[in-house]
Image (tube, helix red, strand yellow):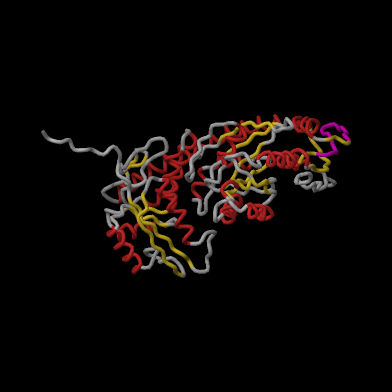
Amino acid sequence: MMSKVATPTANPQERAFLVGLNIKNQPGLLTIDDSLQELALLAETAGLGVVGQAQQTLEHPNSKTYMGSGKIKEIKALVEDLVADVVLFDDELNPRHQRELEKEFGESVQVVDRTALILDIFAQHAQTREGALQVELAQYEYQLPRLTRAWTHLARQAGGGGGRSGSVGGVGLRGPGETQLEVDRRQIRRRIASLKKELEKVRAHRSRHRERRKRSAIPTVALVGYTNAGKSTLLNFLSDAEVYVANELFATLDPTTRRVVSSKGHPFLFTDTVGFIQKLPTGLIAAFRATLEEIHEADLLLHVVDISHANAASQAEAVQATLEEIQVSGIPMVTALNKIDRVPDQEYIYDQVDSFERAVPISARTGDGVDTLLAVIERVMFEDSLEVTVELPYKEGHLISIFHDHGEVASISYDRDRVVISGKLPQRLEREFRPYFLPDSSELSGQDPYEGFD
């Protein structure tokens, strides 16, 4: 009797070799070792198995092969010895570097940069139509200048799981020559234009929702932070929601908004947004514009920091840099120093409080400190106030109503086409009313948000 031959139930895990370049006099947020460690986590999140790594320090990248030619030969030998399938570079490669490195490593090894890897992770994790559209747009815009070889790697599309077909979104990327490449480029440009139109509809839809929320005058809090800092866990704790949580990078991409009522009865809308990371691809930021506008329109930013991470300060700096890149400014911020249950030295935690804006140590997993966090948010949103005088046209009737309902009116006068109101407004409403401020409006009252908390 012949024995049965076992057949695999899943595709074997691809083996990845990591490569990092340290540029002299260009310090990054992370050291080269820490950055490669983060790249390893990204690789694992994408389903790759890391089998080795190499790094080099140069004055500047090699114009042809990114790394020095001798180093490339050394890496090629290591890749062959370790039977690696993929060489992962810890930066975005320009198209020339990509082409030359593919020639160096040959057809049997895939050359993938950090940007392509992150795009692949996003493609795997996008769960909604909006997320899928945003990721697909970023993928096409990344791939367009690189159409020189079949992109058999990272071909999974958001929501589609297209496997290793050698095509992306139904557009064949392997052509016999220049003519086929031009055909492919035209098809991709048409698809990019179509995706941008669809995303503009999404953006308009989100904008209408935000306008309705503004009319309700319920304050909105946008959770921002480095990927895997615990934003979704915190949202779940606050609202008894069931947002997907996993101990991996970019576990959730699609924004989730939940209503939370404080102990004093004040309602809030908390929105979880996509996590940030150092070297976040610019194209990805552009593609996620509709999602990131939730941050722009928030009344307060809740910056969640994994205080147990060895690079917590650098991660927080990366978040601040991304907020500057997407031009978010003038929004009050509270910082949640999360995962204190993982830090044995409690004195260390409290030593870090002064390093962050309005920082509150918490554990989103156990709930420790969350009541204090909500109290600080509530104080910033409702008790920090501005002494203002505003001149409101009657067509902005909703703002007149908001001032009466949420502010303190000291005096009011009516004219033919306007109303002038003096009084106090919650700081969270400053941006809405600022276009109508008169010169005698004063600055924030300066109340300490921690006053009364020990």
Per the rendered image, the range of residues in magenta is 411-424
Magenta span contains residue 362: no
**Residue 131: where, in percent of width, then height?**
48, 37
State left or right for residue 198 relative to residue 439: left
Which residue is nearer to you in this view: 312 or 324?
A: 312
List x then y, in percent, for residue 26. 52, 65
Q: Pick the residue in front: 65 or 91.
A: 91
Q: Residue at x 59, y 44 (%)?
A: 224
Left or right: residue 180 versus residue 26 is: left
Nearer-the-camera pick, 273 or 260 = 260
Q: Residue furthest left?
A: 1
Q: Quarter of the image containing the N terminus?
A: top left
Q: How many marks?
A: 0
- When the figure is inspected, residue 382 is found, relative to residue 97, above or below; the finding is above
Does 406 sit above or below residue 280? above
Residue 419 vs residue 110: left or right?
right
Magenta highlight: main SS: strand
The percent coordinates of residue 219 (x first, y second) are: 69, 35
Horizontal and vertical percent for residue 354?
69, 54
Residue drawn at point x = 57 percent, y = 54 percent: 312
